[in-house]
Image (cartoon, helix red, strand yellow):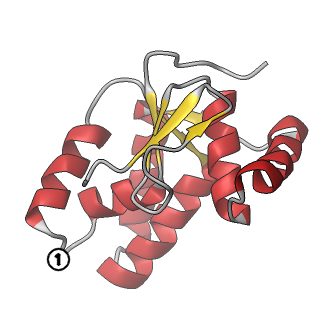
Amino acid sequence: MTASYKSGYFLDSNIWIYALADNQTASKHEIACQLVDAEGVVISTQVINEVCINLIKKSSFTEQQVKELIESFYEGCLIITFNSEILTNASELRTRYNLSYWDSLIVSCALAAEVPILYSEDMQDGLVIANKLEIINPFK
């Protein structure tokens, strides 16, 4: 059984990067910080991996900083990990909604967490998935 945060929301990796990386647009940084600091934040292990590699490459995060960030994710967020249901559902989502491989995994994890909103800059703003999950670009 997958944990649920029905009143929370899922954050894609790009939101975290705007909140944590150097040299980000001030307005996007502010919005992203509000989202990551709220209660009920859900992410997946994929998001953790994407955020960490981007911060290592683009913001020169040290291994100590990465370790502390990973610990903070596990302390403050609900973390969804892949299982067979999430992976097979992602395949169905790719077919039905024409999502990329990686985006379909994010969406499948958000659906598994039963959150109503997925915040992402990179996916189609306003798209509703399975009448359960709305993708919202918080920067529009």
Could one spot residue 119 in this view of the protein?
Answer: yes
Residue 7 point in image, percent of width and height: 44, 16
Residue lying at the far left in this picture: please name it.
26
The C terminus lies in which quarter of the figure?
bottom left
Q: Residue 76, position in %: x, y?
A: 40, 32
> In the rendered view, does 128 fall on the left or right side of 87?
left
Q: Viewer-proximal residue, 105 or 76?
A: 105
Identify the residue at horizontal 53%, vertical 65% (top origin). Answer: 50
Q: Residues within 10 Å of mark 1 (few under 14, many from 20)?
A: few
**Which residue is nearer to you in this view: 58 or 5?**
5
Which residue occupies 29% across, 47% down?
138
Dividing the picture into quadrants, the one containing residue 27 is bottom left
Quarter of the image with the N terminus is top right
Residue occupying the point 72% across, 59% down: 98
Which quarter of the picture shows residue 26? bottom left
- The kind of secondary structure element at disc 1 is loop
Residue for badge 1: 23
Query: Is residue 80 visible to the viewer in this orientation of the structure?
Result: no
Q: Amino acid at mark 1?
A: Asn
Count of labels in the image:
1
Q: Position of residue 105 (x, y in %)?
A: 70, 51
- Give the camera-side residue of 106 and 76: 106
The answer to whether 57 appears left or right of 129 in the picture is left
In the image, 63 versus 107, the foreground residue is 107
Q: Residue at x 68, y 31 (%)?
A: 130
Q: Is 118 situated above or below 120?
A: above
Name the spot of residue 54 as percent of width and height, x first: 44, 74
